[in-house]
Image (spheres, grey):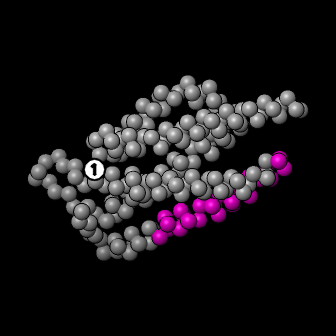
Amino acid sequence: LPIQNREMGGQFSMHMWTSITVGFIFAFPFILWEIWKFISPALYEKERKYAVSFIIVSSFLFFVGVLFGYYLIAPLSVQFFASYIVSPEISNSIDIDSYISLMKTSAIASGLLFELPIIIFFLTKIGLVTPEFLRKYRKYTLVIVLIVAAIITPPDVLSQIIVTIPIMILYEASILISVLVVRSQEREKLNA
């Protein structure tokens, strides 16, 4: 796949933005720590003790998501878009900015998508989501995930399934986390 640069400062700009993106990825645990320090004054003492667990689990999920996006989603997307042609008279000459943008977007978006269990944990904690709600809309979620997987992967079923399975595993893990949060809240009410 030949990649070209058509701007004078294109490679320099690409190098700088890639460095910023990689810096963001590696600084993610520190960013989470800063966010935790910001919200921790509003939490009870027993909730503050989960800071280290929260940062470790969130960082782990984010890093796994980034690796998933970089090594699976991005290559599938590049393969599809680079080989897609409307007419044989039109050739694909991929610009470096477009290529790097696709790689960065795939990696960061997957990393953030893998934060789904953490998001569901907090949404359940504040009462916006229940396990019943998540179970009720499971089939709609599957359809949406299959559609998104069909868009970002080459037009073959195997690639679509490879992308869909981890996302649905995360969704099922989110349901389990929601159940555990609700049970914990019910125990606290009984003990109070």
Q: Tell me the chief SS of the magenta region.
A: helix
Image vertical order of residue 57 relative to residue 183, above or below? below
Measured from the top left, where is residue 133 in percent x and y? 60, 27
Amino acid type for the residue under numbered disc 1 = Phe
Q: Is residue 158 above or below residue 82?
A: above
- The residue wearing badge 1 is 80
Q: Nearer the viewer, residue 92 or 71?
A: 71
- For residue 43: magenta? yes
Q: Position of residue 147 (x, y in %)?
A: 38, 36
Q: Please, which residue is most extreme toward the left here?
A: 89
Residue visible at 14% across and 54% down in the picture: 90
Left or right: residue 92 versus residue 150 is left
Q: Specify start and end residues of the magenta stretch as a single range.
A: 19-46
In front of the other: 116 or 19: 116
Asked whether the viewer can see residue 128, the reply is: no
Residue 30 appears in the figure: yes
Element carrying mark 1: helix
